[in-house]
Each structure stands twice: as structure tokens, then as C-alpha cells.
Image: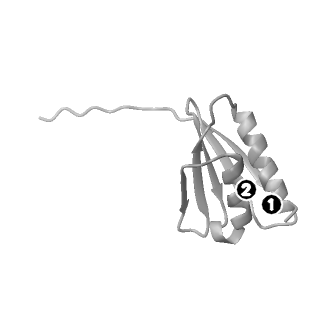
Amino acid sequence: MTNVKMEQKLSIKYKFKLTADESFAEVIVSFAHGSHEWTLEANFVPLEQREFVDALDRALPFEVIAKDGRGGCTIQGPVPEGMTRADVMERIEAVFADTIVAG
């Protein structure tokens, strides 16, 4: 008989949703508990909001960007050394406000 091991993990994610009345664009930013990475899920593909993606890359360099197959994309990156989650959210919110809302 084969021994089967089961491991259970509790994953808590802190999620923040950014939307604007003037735009269809919506992003959800999450941080997994204990992780030093952030994940941004958007309801648009990078080419639709190229200005947002370029500005985000300047504000918070990311490692992964991929289409999600549902008309959106996922962007992931590390929390930079010396920054808090609040700092990361502040930068993402500023990029969203400058590129999506102000257009």
C-alpha cells in the first residue's frame, strides 16, 4: 500500500479593487499572506492599456505579465526591498489614476 501524505495550507490574500466611473478598466491587486510579491489582475489586455502597463513598469518593475484567456491579464512582481504593501498600493493607485482615470 502506498503512503499518501496530505498537506493543508491556509492562504489568506489581501485584495484591493480599483475602478473608475469614467472607464471600464478594473484592477484587483492582491498580496498573499507571508509573501513578498504582489499580483494585479486586470480586465483588459496589455495592448488596450499600454500607457498603464508602461507606467506601472516604471513605478514597480514586474516579472510576469500574461493574458488570462478571458480578455484580461495578470501582472506579478516582487515587493521592492524597503517597501511595504501600502507603498506598493500607493504606487499602483497613482499609476491607475494617472493613466486610466486621467487618460
Residue 99: mark: 1
Which residue sits furthest front?
A: 58
Q: Residue at x 74, y 36 (%)?
A: 87
Front-most of residues 79 and 14: 79
Q: Find residue 56 and report its horizontal and vertical position in percent.
A: 70, 53
Q: Using the rendered view, name the quadrant where residue 86 is placed.
A: top right
Left/right of residue 1 with respect to residue 102 in the rendered view:
left
Left/right of residue 77 with respect to residue 96 in the rendered view:
left
Residue at disc 1, secondary structure? helix
Looking at the image, do the residues carrying marks 1 and 2 touch, with CB atoms under 8 Å apart?
yes
Left/right of residue 65 with respect to residue 49 in the rendered view:
left
- Report the amino acid beneath label 1: Thr
Q: In terms of sequence position, does the residue under pointer 1 or pointer 2 come before the other? A: 2
Q: Using the rendered view, name the quadrant where residue 31 is placed.
A: top right
How is the rendered protein coloured?
one colour
Classify 10 Å Cα crowding around label 2: few (below 14), some (14-19), many (20 and above): some
Classify 10 Å Cα crowding around label 1: few (below 14), some (14-19), many (20 and above): some
Q: Look at discs 1 and 2 and give the one toward the viewer.
A: 2
Residue at disc 2, secondary structure? helix
Q: Is residue 45 visible?
A: no
Q: Residue at x 67, y 63 (%)?
A: 43
Measure the alpha-carbon separation of dots 1 and 2. Answer: 8 Å
Front-most of residues 94 and 7: 94
- Report the amino acid beneath label 2: Ala
Q: Find residue 14 and report its horizontal and vertical position in percent.
A: 66, 38
Q: How many marks on residues?
A: 2
Q: Find residue 5 and report its horizontal and vertical position in percent.
A: 27, 31
Residue 44's place in the image compared with 64, above or below, is below
The residue indicated by pointer 2 is 55
Residue 14's place in the image compared with 99, above or below, is above
Residue 89: mark: none
